[in-house]
Amino acid sequence: MPETSKTADQALTILLELTKSGPTTPAELARRLSMNRTVVHRLLATLHGRGFVTRTAAGYAPGAILVSLAERVQPELRAAAASVMSELGRKIGETVVMHIADGEDAMVLEQYVATGHVVRVEHEIGSRHPLAKGASGRALLAFLGEPAIQRVLRKAESPEALQRQLEMVRQLGYALSHDELQEGVHGLAVPVFDQPDHAVASLAIIAPTTRAAGISDHLDELLEASRRVGTSLYGEPVAARSTASR
């Protein structure tokens, strides 16, 4: 195995922690990551100088340069999804978001933010959360393949409960969530397939609780959007095999 750089690894660890936790002080970062405070201060200064982090009143936060970097990830998938997502989002008046798998996390690759309501939900491109949490994560995880699923299950607080949730996603073809990643936010997500039973991304509608009652009414439209994205990339429509055929 190639030799790695401890300093680079520490800097990346700090950056990943900030993407998960939001604005954080150097002292809190050092405590959470069990790192020397002086080292944390020095690495944050370097990251700040390069634009990877920014300073706020509440502490350090991810910098804007991460957005431009994220925009260079999966350009074909982003291009295929952008117009479909905006069309769906304008039609239903809610935010539509696409996630891809990055290790054991689901990462926001693209989104359309609805602007017709004062109260709306949105993510940051490049932000991430565990695959086991939220509708977007589970709709993706359920169709990632057994090795990836087992890695997540081994670290889950309740592997049996997560396994049941994933099986339900496979049977229904979609995932629902509420108040998991953000209080007062509901999500409806479906996989985007690149081959039968394997997802390359998930596509989700997210809405505040005040408008969540009808979120499932948009399932057919969301499934059609997912099919259009997959077809534009991979040709023939790709879907999961039916439960009966397994």
Image (cartoon, rainbow, N blue to C red):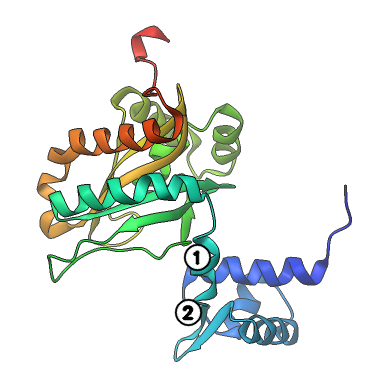
Give the residue at x 46% y 55%. Answer: 129
x and y percent of residue 236 in the render?
39, 22
Tell me: 215 left or right of 72: left
Res 230 quadrant in image: top left
- Going by the numbered disc 2, the residue's amino acid type is Pro
Q: Nearer the viewer, residue 174 or 52?
A: 52
Residue ID at (33%, 22%)? 171
The residue at which mark 2 appears reads as: 23
- Secondary-structure class at tag 2: loop
Q: Quadrant of residue 123?
A: bottom left
Identify the image quadrant of the C terminus: top left
Q: Is residue 187 left or right of residue 34?
A: left
Total marks drawn? 2
Label 1 close to label 2 by CB (< 8 Å)? no
User: Can residue 5 be seen at all in this image of the molecule?
Assistant: yes
Residue at x 65% of width, y 78% of height: 30
Along the viewing direction, whichever of 53 and 78 lies nearer the viewer:
78
Q: Position of residue 125 (x, y in %)?
A: 43, 62
In the picture shown, does residue 191 fall above or below 66?
above
Q: CA distance from mark 1 to mark 2?
A: 10 Å
Task: Give residue 20's mark.
Answer: 1
Where is residue 73? Give x, y as percent. 54, 54
Left or right: 86 as drawn, with respect to 45: left
Q: Amino acid at mark 1?
A: Lys
Residue 165 seen in the current view: no
Q: Residue at x 14, y 49 (%)?
A: 91
Q: Is residue 82 left or right of residue 201?
A: left
Q: Residues within 10 Å of mark 1 (few under 14, many from 20)?
A: some
Q: Identify the image quadrant of residue 216.
A: top left
**Where in the figure is residue 198, as x and y percent of width and height?**
48, 28
The label on residue 167 is none
